[in-house]
Image: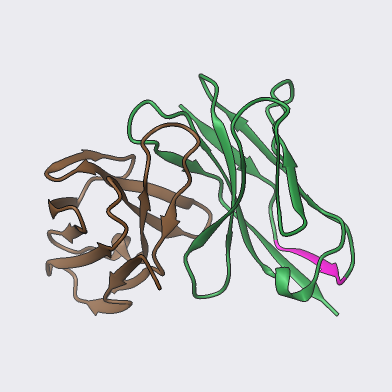
Chain colours: A green, B brown
């Protein structure tokens, strides 16, 4: 079945550092890919998405490119801020009725001054 | 302006008792979902609904049932709560059932079974 693998956390960075959170996936078809962010005590929020190969999703300085050849969707940001501290989830959907999402285990990011 | 609300936000219950969690939306979205979040597992789908009275199972549906009698409400019931059902439960809604549509999540219900 479908699965999503994310790098283990927590990831601790200094403010203004470059961020990469790795995400790879296994799917039988041609999925859409998502990054969600969860701030403490809150639900998940959609951060960005890509629906076909070579698409780049972007939002709030975050980017991720759908790489079909490496089945990857790595999240990047050029300069992180303390306010980016959160848990980040990679997810995929193959549709097939119901648009069910399969999530990775999440990666906690801590940004320090 | 929350389009999706969950109740209660926190609940402590005893093993063997029934528990019902409620998800209410004001967006008139067709699709609604219940997920549980556990450390090391991310989010896992329990049940989902694709319309009034239309529901289907997810990957971790054992011990849970759902009902959707109105577009705006999706109820999750633990018939006889067990300690393994201690978790944070999230409801989500989507305005499309096709690939590419994102979800809007509620703020979650933290359930503790003692």
Residue A105: image location, x then y, percent: 56, 50
Rendered residue at 45%/41% (across/down):
A101
Q: Is residue A20 left or right of residue A88?
A: right
Q: Is residue A43 left or right of residue A105?
A: left
The stretch drawn in magenta includes residue B49: no
Q: Is residue A47 above or below residue A30?
A: below
Rendered residue at 14%/45% (across/down):
B52
Q: Is residue A62 left or right of residue A105?
A: right
Q: Is residue A37 left or right of residue B29?
A: right
Rendered residue at 71%/64% (across/down):
A109
Q: Is residue A64 above or below residue B87?
A: above
Question: Which part of the image, by quadrant, shows the C terminus of chain A?
Answer: bottom right
Residue B37: image location, x then y, percent: 43, 58
Residue A85: image location, x then y, percent: 70, 70
Question: Which part of the image, by quadrant, shows the N terminus of chain A?
Answer: top left
Residue B67: image location, x then y, percent: 13, 52
Question: Magenta: predominant secondary structure element?
Answer: strand
Closer to the camera in the image, A43 or B101? B101
Q: Is residue B14 above or below residue A24?
A: below
Residues drawn in magenta: A10-15
Closer to the camera in the image, A109 or B93? B93
How many discs appear? 0
């Amino acid at each position: 079945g479908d699965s999503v693998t994310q790098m283990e956390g927590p990831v601790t960075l200094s403010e203004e550092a470059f961020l990469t959170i790795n995400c790879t996936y296994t799917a039988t078809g041609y999925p859409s890919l998502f990054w969600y962010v969860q701030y403490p005590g809150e639900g998940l929020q959609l951060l960005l998405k890509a629906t076909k190969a070579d698409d780049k999703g972007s939002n709030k300085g975050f980017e991720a490119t759908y790489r079909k050849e490496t089945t990857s969707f790595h999240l990047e940001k050029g300069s992180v801020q303390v306010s980016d501290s959160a848990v980040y989830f990679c997810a995929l959907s193959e549709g097939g009725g119901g648009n069910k999402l399969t999530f990775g285990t999440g990666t906690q990011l801590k940004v320090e001054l | 302006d929350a389009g999706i609300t969950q109740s209660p936000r926190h609940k402590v219950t005893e093993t063997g008792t029934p528990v019902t969690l409620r998800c209410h939306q004001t967006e008139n979205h067709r699709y609604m979902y219940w997920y549980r979040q556990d450390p090391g597992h991310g989010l896992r789908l329990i049940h989902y609904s694709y319309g009034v009275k239309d529901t289907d199972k997810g990957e971790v549906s054992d011990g849970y049932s759902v009902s959707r009698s109105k577009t705006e409400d999706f109820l999750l019931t633990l018939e006889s709560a067990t300690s393994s059902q201690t978790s944070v439960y999230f409801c989500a809604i989507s305005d499309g059932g096709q690939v590419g549509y994102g979800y809007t999540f509620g703020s979650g219900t933290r359930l503790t079974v003692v």
